[in-house]
Image: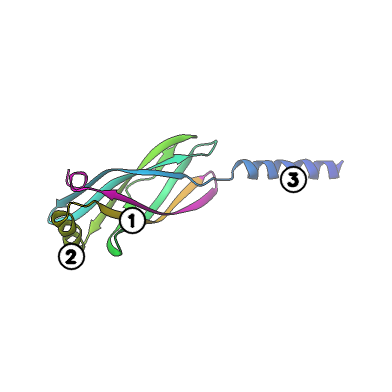
Amino acid sequence: MSNLFRFIVCLVIILFYQSCKIKDVTYKRIENLNFELRNAVPNINFDIVCYNPNAMGCRIGQLHCEILSNTDSVAYAYNIETLKVRPYSEFSVPVKSIVSAKAAFKLTGKSLLSTKDIPIRLVGHMKIKKFIFSHTYYFDVTESFNKSQLYK
């Protein structure tokens, strides 16, 4: 009887663990990108839109990324708040960054002098939590934006 009990307990633990495995979220796009001056400090704000492929909801605990234009580091960005995400749904994480004046001038100078799109690359990670489990999703994505999208 005790072997049967141990087997059942082990089976329940394994099934619980398997059901709590966290799949990587899927990156979709960047939305609401804007460049602004706030108290003479340049800021880049945007939303990262992702898809949650997990069967259960989860939380986005932290998001940190570096914003690059070509090979130049422009800013370091972070999420504003912890976000609850529904299962099998698309969600957007609001991201803020403070940009150095030198990097902002490089970025705006490139866009003002050129009619080409500006490539912006995000390299970072997002921590996904479910119950007591957590998983870090690493991303490296590049999108192009034109002047009208950057200066709304």
Which of the numbered marks, if any, corresponds to residue 102?
2
Label 2 crowd (10 A; few <14 / some 14-19 / many >=20): few
Identified by mark 3, the residue type is Cys
Label 3: how many Cα within 10 Å (few below 14, some 14–19, many 20+): few
Circle number at residue 5: none
Tell me, yes or no, whether the highlighted magenta stretch contains residue 18: no
Q: Which circle's residue, 2 or 1, is located before the other in the chain? A: 2
Location of residue 92 in the rendering, given as x and y in whole percent from the top left corner: 36, 40
- Report helix, strand or loop for mark 1: strand
Horizontally, is 62 left or right of 6 in the view?
left
Give the Cα separation between the discs numbered 2 and 1: 18 Å
Question: As shown in the figure, which amino acid type bears the numbered disc 2?
Answer: Lys
Classify mark 1: residues with Cα within 10 Å, few (<14), some (14-19) or many (20+): many
The answer to which image quadrant residue 42 occupies is bottom left
In magenta, the rendered stretch is 130-152
Please state, as top left, top right, bottom left or bottom right, where the C terminus lies in the image: top left
State whether residue 83 is above or below residue 135. Answer: above
**Residue at mark 1:** 121
Callout 3 secondary element: helix
Q: Nearer the viewer, residue 46 or 109?
A: 109
Dominant SS of magenta comes to strand
Tell me which amino acid carries mark 1.
Arg
Which numbered marker is on residue 10?
Answer: 3
